Image (tube, coloured by chain):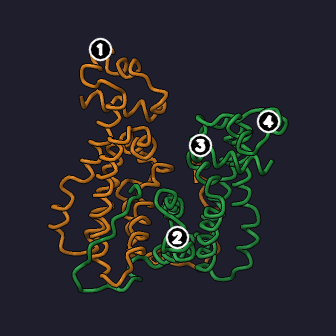
Chain colours: A orange, B green
């Protein structure tokens, strides 16, 4: 099942979920369509299997790991590094979550969304532990989603094979989130030509 | 044409680009299909019109506005507020850019992507003006996309009708980006129950 899920996740990511057929998936894992149907009665169930498993990977064990870390900032650093590592090791699944989850039937979408909410709550709790309870809830929500925004947006531009390693990337996001760009050394020198990126903004 | 574009952007956002027909668009603006075809020979050209116009709105005049601002941090604050304001005033068009641009034919996609690249370059230049040229280009790119990530991710969770106004949201993003969460008052009090959000993480 895991083999089918991985192959399907890659196809969904390359061709789109709607554009991928069971025959495509069967061909990718050199099985018959009947073989696939033995494990998954519908294509929807394959998508659900992929996204649900990915969210389990994201959520399971996180609270226990965080409890082992005393320092509030170190907990945030751990969350960022772990998020980026999971993304890089499961890029097709993570992108599927961002782009294809709306194709799930309502019942399955709800289960995946509950897991996402659980993840949100764990991260928001770590932030409120760090920042204290004087922050209004709506601002805590905005701060938490600002962090998710920096981490999730990497799907649109980041190439782990480029010069910036996943560890470098996690460090940049942690530095900005914890201390802001003021933590970067300022300079009076006129700025250089900025890098031209092919990625979408 | 603008009226057709606005109505089409809303439909693309609600139903999806592929799922929206010219008949749906014609009905939304109480025109005949022939009337729509008079302005736009294909549905693709409507999408291109919407996304290209939105990027023009984002890019045009930005450099001139930035030149009027002396302080580097104020320029970043201006960029964030302007980005969020444009998003809130043109939510359907902005979401279309994030979700539907891949449906454009290559020739048109390229033109829209060039405009996005122009926007990226202007923002990256403002950041390199602020941070100096000692920052490696790959880190400058990551910092710029961290900022875009915080600003763009709002599509997944932010409701401008909620308690957090667009100005509040811009302020949170600017505070984090410029000074980090250390700028929020820390507290020794045990954290409260964090807010439960219905939004996707």
Instruction: List the residue tagged with mark 4.
Output: B32
Is A5 situated above or below B133? above
Q: Chain of mark 2?
A: B
Picture residue at 30% right of the left edge, 65% below the top: A123
Is any atom of residue A172 visible in this view? Answer: no
Q: Is residue B53 left or right of residue B159?
A: right
Q: Chain of mark 3?
A: B
Foreground pick, A34 / B22: B22
Foreground pick, B160 / A72: B160
Give a yes or no on whether discs 4 and 3 share a subunit: yes
Q: Chain of mark 1?
A: A
Give the SS element for disc 3: helix
Picture residue at 30% right of the left edge, 66% below the top: A77
Q: CA distance from mark 4 to mark 2?
A: 59 Å
Asked if labels 1 and 2 touch by Cβ distance under 8 angstroms, the answer is no
Q: CA distance from mark 2 to mark 1?
A: 59 Å
Nearest-to-viewer mark from 1 and 4: 4
Q: CA distance from mark 3 to mark 1?
A: 34 Å
Give a yes or no on whether discs 3 and 2 share a subunit: yes
Instruction: List the residue tagged with mark 3.
Output: B100
Give the SS element for disc 4: loop
Q: Is residue B128 left or right of residue B52?
A: left
Task: Tell me the tag on residue A34.
Answer: 1
Foreground pick, B167 / A93: B167
Task: Tell me the tag on residue B134.
Answer: 2
Q: In terms of sequence position, does the residue under pointer 3 or pointer 2 come before the other?
A: 3
How busy is the neighbourhood of tag 1: few (under 14 within 10 Å), some, or many (20 plus)? few
Give the SS element for disc 2: loop
Asked if labels 2 and 4 touch by Cβ distance under 8 angstroms, the answer is no
Rendering coords of residue A87 (x, y %)? 35, 48
Q: In terms of sequence position, does the residue under pointer 4 or pointer 2 come before the other?
A: 4
């Amino acid at each position: 099942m895991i083999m089918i899920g991985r192959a399907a996740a890659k196809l969904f990511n390359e061709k789109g979920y709607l554009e991928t057929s069971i025959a495509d998936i069967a061909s990718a894992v050199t099985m018959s369509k009947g073989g696939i149907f033995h494990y998954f009665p519908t294509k929807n169930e394959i998508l659900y299997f992929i996204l649900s498993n990915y969210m389990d990977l994201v959520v399971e064990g996180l609270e226990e790991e965080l409890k082992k870390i005393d320092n509030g900032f170190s907990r945030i650093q751990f969350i960022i590094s772990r998020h980026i590592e999971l993304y890089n090791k499961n890029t097709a699944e993570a992108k599927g979550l961002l782009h294809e989850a709306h194709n799930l039937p309502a019942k399955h979408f709800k289960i995946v969304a509950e897991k996402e909410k659980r993840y949100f709550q764990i991260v928001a709790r770590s932030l409120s532990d760090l920042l204290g309870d004087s922050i209004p809830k709506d601002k805590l929500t905005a701060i938490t989603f600002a962090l998710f925004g920096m981490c999730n947006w990497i799907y649109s531009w980041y190439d782990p094979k480029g010069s910036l390693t996943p560890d470098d990337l996690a460090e940049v996001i942690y530095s900005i989130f914890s201390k802001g760009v003021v933590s970067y050394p300022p300079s009076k020198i006129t700025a250089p030509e900025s890098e031209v990126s092919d990625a979408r903004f």
